[in-house]
Image: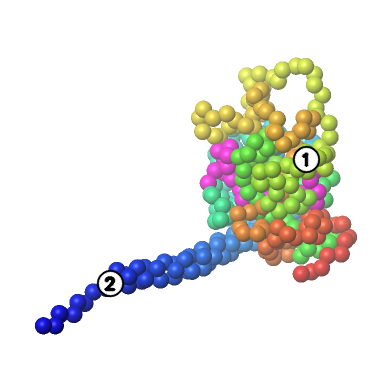
């Protein structure tokens, strides 16, 4: 008697099918992730293009680009002390935020209690989809983009070579190297490392400090890399920030004695130490910054969470992805608005 045929898969056949499906998934997943990253990168490029268009509109109205930061004197320290209104505060009406602009009180500084509500706003035009969105480490609205203040690592001051710096008054006619070859904006990343906290961490998009200004003197993605080139340049003395303030032997003033307007505004979680408070006597010196260097004057460079590089908006409105491996000299020249050096247009 013949045995009836069984309509079923054997164990070996099932295992082979599972193995084939697993191989197909392994092949397709990188392609799917690459497609998602490509979409995020396009969205990020669109944000940068909007910022470039906004400052172009500002320049057409005021005959100058917005100042990178505003203060009575420099250099600018990345501490929540001072006027420090950023370039972003000036262009709010040109990025469809006229209501936020009206709520800003320009008679007081970026850290004044009157401006805290605006400072805590999250602006989508400042968010890169490849980075975590929301609040900066200080509890205020963050920005994943910064203006270019200089072509070397140096404090933010009035004599910087970039387009946006302290009390800058730069028009398109002052960009002698050509807008297509001059960086206006670039991406930046966050880090809660010891070095980043004591160099100012991030004070949010309203603050005209290293939170909204960076330079091309630091390699791309070096600033947020633990033990990376920026830390190495500081440790071997390639970054000279001048002598520290003289030691008078006096204790910092008590917070209760400071004028209310000038006191730092801490918008972070309750019970968490404010790393930016000028009256905080527990501030520590980062391990990779030698004694005598004022870490709050270190600005740092651009970087992103995109693979292999970061995106930049140039003065002509174009947005390009610059690789980490870009020639350092070429990259520095892109941060100088009028150095007169030749630069291949490619």
Q: Main secondary structure of the magenta part?
A: loop
Q: Find out whether residue 228 is within the magenta segment.
A: no
Residue 83 picture quarter: top right
Label 1 crowd (10 A; few <14 / some 14-19 / many >=20): some
* Disc 2 secondary structure class: loop
The percent position of residue 23, horizontal first and vertical second, equals 44, 68
Label 2 crowd (10 A; few <14 / some 14-19 / many >=20): few
Circle nearer the viewer, 2 or 1: 2
* Disc 1 secondary structure class: helix
Residue at image location 70% in from the left, 61% down from the top: 322
Residue at image location 63% in from the left, 39% down from the top: 193
Left or right of 114, for residue 293: right
Q: Which residue is mark 1?
A: 234
- Asked if marks 2 and 1 touch (Cβ < 8 Å), the reply is no
Up the image or down, 218 lies above or below 295; here it is below
The percent position of residue 168, horizontal first and vertical second, equals 79, 47
The percent position of residue 152, horizontal first and vertical second, equals 81, 48
Q: Which residue is mark 2?
A: 10
Residue 299 picture quarter: top right
Left or right of 162, for residue 127: left
Residue at image location 75% in from the left, 60% down from the top: 326
The percent position of residue 145, horizontal first and vertical second, equals 65, 52
Quadrant for the C terminus, please: bottom right
Identify the magenta region: 134-155
């Amino acid at each position: 008697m013949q045995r009836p045929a069984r309509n079923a898969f054997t164990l070996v056949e099932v295992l082979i099918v599972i193995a084939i499906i697993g191989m197909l998934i392994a092949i397709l997943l990188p392609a799917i992730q690459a497609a998602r990253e490509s979409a995020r990168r396009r969205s990020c490029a669109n944000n940068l293009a909007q910022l470039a268009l906004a400052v172009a509109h500002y320049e057409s109205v005021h005959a100058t680009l917005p100042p990178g930061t505003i203060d009575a004197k420099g250099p600018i320290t990345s501490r929540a002390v001072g006027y420090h209104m950023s370039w972003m505060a000036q262009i709010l009406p040109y990025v469809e935020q006229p209501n936020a602009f009206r709520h800003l009180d320009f008679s007081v500084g970026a850290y004044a209690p009157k401006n805290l509500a605006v400072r805590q706003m999250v602006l989508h035009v400042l968010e890169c989809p490849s980075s975590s969105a929301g609040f900066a480490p200080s509890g205020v609205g963050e920005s994943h983009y910064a203006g270019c203040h200089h072509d070397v690592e140096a404090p933010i001051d009035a004599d910087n070579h970039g387009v946006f710096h302290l009390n800058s008054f730069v028009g398109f006619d002052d960009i002698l190297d050509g807008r297509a070859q001059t960086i206006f904006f670039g991406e930046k990343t966050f880090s809660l490392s010891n070095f980043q906290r004591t160099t100012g961490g991030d004070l949010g998009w309203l603050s005209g400090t290293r939170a909204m200004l960076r330079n091309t003197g630091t390699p791309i993605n070096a600033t947020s890399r633990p033990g990376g080139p920026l830390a190495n340049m500081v440790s071997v003395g390639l970054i000279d920030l001048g002598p520290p303030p003289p030691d008078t032997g006096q204790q910092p003033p008590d917070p209760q004695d400071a004028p209310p307007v000038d006191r730092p505004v801490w918008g972070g979680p309750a019970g968490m130490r404010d790393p930016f408070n000028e009256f905080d006597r527990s501030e520590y010196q980062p391990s990779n910054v030698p004694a005598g260097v004022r870490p709050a004057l270190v600005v740092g460079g651009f970087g992103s969470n995109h693979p292999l590089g970061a995106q930049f908006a140039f003065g002509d409105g174009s947005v390009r992805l610059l690789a980490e491996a870009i020639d350092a000299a070429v990259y520095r020249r892109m941060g100088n608005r009028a150095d007169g050096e030749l630069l291949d247009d490619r």
